Image (spheres, rainbow, N blue to C red):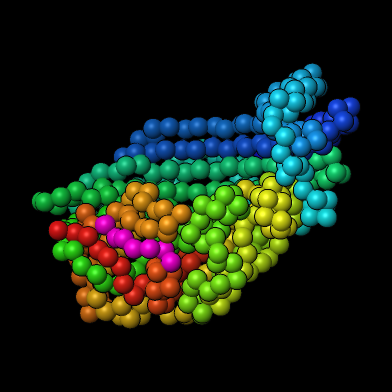
């Protein structure tokens, strides 16, 4: 049986299971939603040309949530038999009887639900060819070793290919499904000279396997990065401009996601609590959320509670236009859900339409940050402090690698201090952004 036929068979089975569950739930006199998720795939790990690990995944799970008036009970199981489903419903109802009553709990309003999933071109299966997967990983490593004699070891070369089937339904009449694929490769190499050893990596991810970066290119890039970090130096403490490279720029904007998430807003645990419809970025900067990008890594036609997703403006001319809400925290705030139960979808950050090289020249002298460490970000105050690795830039050119530094500031100031964003957009994450130039940050070194 081919993979596609197997998936079609599984999809029909999961859809019928959801229908059976919703039918059985009619006897319990409560609202209910049902989510079934199945993941099928392989993972291959090669290190120094030797296959260290091959994994096959075939996992399914059924989630049932019961809303008994304003009380909630949730259960999950891998057993999809009718007997098991009946028991799950019984347990969920019993849990709800002992749960605290919460007026804001319940299914979304029916007007927000998705009753017709749109086609987003997310499903591009591959036949799980183990030999080809191993070959890709080996080629990536070989190319890295061949790139430079200072590449002395490997931390591993990985290949992953997975198919996910999602079925969601509730007692309001919604029953929708979609399936998606995700293929990825990763390579991490170790370089060495007389004074030190360094490591660095590169990866590729796509809905279509043909869109992955060629293994040889991936290996060469990871090797080049590892070699470029040899000779890292410490630098003196100072204040200077900073560039977050496009590989990590999504992390910079992920703090905005946390700061405007509904849970943090209604609990008043965000420094942006009073900033809705206020300017928090330069007036040229825009962020649009587009859940409907074809083959998008963050594309989704409905969120985790069945609410239809929609294209919307997050930041418009520097102004914060919305919170990120699910049904629960929307009710808490006396607002409407934004369809963000479960996260965000394809944030597109505007840029200044200049190249990365021009961005370096614009900065002239400062620090290019290529890797961040630690979790020193306080969403309540906006204070920011993280370990960093990168390069010193002098006269618009990369001079030498630096390490053992800490960059710090406050997110409000950092966002307002964005000077420019280059056009080297990294599309491997939910947040798609180029490299970001900030006018000044505190650098702690020697």
> Looking at the picture, does residue 375 appear above or below residue 221?
above
Residue 357 lies left or right of residue 74; in this view the side is left
Residue 324 lies left or right of residue 282; in this view the side is right
Q: Say which residue appears at 24% left-offset and 70% top-offset.
A: 239
> Looking at the picture, does residue 393 appear above or below residue 409?
below
> Looking at the picture, does residue 147 appear above or below residue 414?
above
Q: Main secondary structure of the magenta part?
A: strand
Q: Position of residue 438 (x, y in %)?
A: 36, 72
Asked if residue 295 can be seen in this view, the reply is: no
Q: Position of residue 56 (x, y in %)?
A: 55, 32
- Stretch of the chain drawn in magenta: 406-412
Q: Position of residue 246 (x, y in %)?
A: 41, 65
Q: Nearer the viewer, residue 184 or 317?
A: 317
Q: Say which residue appears at 36% left-offset and 77% top-offset.
A: 359
Residue 183 lies left or right of residue 291; in this view the side is left
Q: Say which residue appears at 72% left-offset and 44% top-offset.
A: 104
Asked if residue 419 can be seen in this view, the reply is: yes
Q: Quadrant of the C terminus?
A: bottom left
Q: Nearer the viewer, residue 243 or 274?
A: 274
Residue 371 sits in quarter:
bottom left
Q: Say which residue appears at 62% left-offset and 69% top-offset.
A: 321
Q: How many marks?
A: 0
Q: Quadrant of the N terminus?
A: top right
Q: Is residue 60 magenta?
A: no
Q: Is residue 408 magenta?
A: yes
Q: Position of residue 326 (x, y in %)?
A: 67, 51
């Amino acid at each position: 049986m081919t993979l596609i036929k197997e998936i079609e068979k599984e999809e029909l089975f999961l859809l019928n299971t959801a229908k059976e569950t919703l039918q059985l739930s009619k006897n319990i006199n409560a609202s209910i939603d049902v989510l079934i998720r199945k993941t099928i795939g392989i993972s291959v790990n090669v290190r120094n040309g030797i296959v260290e690990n091959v994994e096959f995944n075939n996992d399914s799970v059924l989630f049932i949530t019961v809303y008994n008036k304003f009380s909630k009970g949730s259960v999950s199981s891998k057993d999809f038999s009718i007997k098991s489903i009946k028991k799950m419903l019984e347990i969920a109802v019993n849990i709800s009887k002992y749960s605290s009553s919460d007026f804001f709990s319940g299914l979304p309003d029916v007007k927000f639900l998705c009753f017709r999933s749109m086609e987003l071109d997310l499903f591009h299966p591959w036949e799980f060819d183990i030999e080809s997967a191993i070959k890709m990983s080996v080629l990536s490593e070989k190319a890295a070793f061949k790139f430079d004699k200072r590449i002395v070891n490997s931390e591993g070369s990985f290949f992953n290919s997975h198919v996910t089937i999602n079925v969601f339904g509730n007692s309001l009449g919604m029953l929708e499904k979609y399936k998606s694929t995700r293929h990825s490769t990763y390579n991490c190499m170790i370089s060495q000279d007389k004074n030190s050893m360094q490591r660095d990596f590169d990866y590729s991810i796509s809905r279509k396997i043909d869109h992955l970066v060629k293994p040889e290119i991936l290996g060469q890039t990871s090797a080049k990065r590892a070699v470029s970090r040899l000779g890292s130096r410490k630098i003196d403490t100072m204040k200077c401009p900073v560039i977050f490279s496009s590989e990590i720029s999504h992390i910079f904007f992920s703090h905005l996601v946390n700061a405007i998430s509904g849970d943090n807003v209604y609990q008043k645990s965000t420094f942006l609590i009073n900033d809705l419809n206020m300017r928090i970025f330069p007036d040229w900067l825009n962020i649009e959320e587009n859940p409907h990008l074809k083959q998008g890594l963050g594309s989704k036609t409905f969120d985790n509670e069945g609410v239809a997703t929609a294209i919307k403006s997050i930041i418009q001319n520097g102004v914060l236009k919305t919170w990120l809400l699910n049904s629960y925290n929307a009710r808490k705030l006396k607002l409407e859900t934004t369809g963000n139960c479960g996260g965000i979808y394809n944030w597109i950050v505007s840029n200044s339409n200049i190249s990365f090289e021009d961005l370096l020249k614009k900065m002239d002298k400062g620090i290019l940050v290529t890797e961040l460490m630690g979790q020193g970000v306080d969403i309540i105050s906006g204070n920011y402090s993280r370990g960093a690795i990168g390069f010193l830039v002098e006269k618009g050119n990369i001079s030498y690698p630096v390490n053992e530094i800490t960059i710090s500031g406050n997110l409000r100031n950092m966002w307002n201090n964005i000077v420019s964003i280059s056009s080297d957009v990294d599309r491997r994450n939910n947040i798609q952004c180029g490299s970001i130039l900030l006018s000044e940050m505190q650098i702690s070194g020697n």
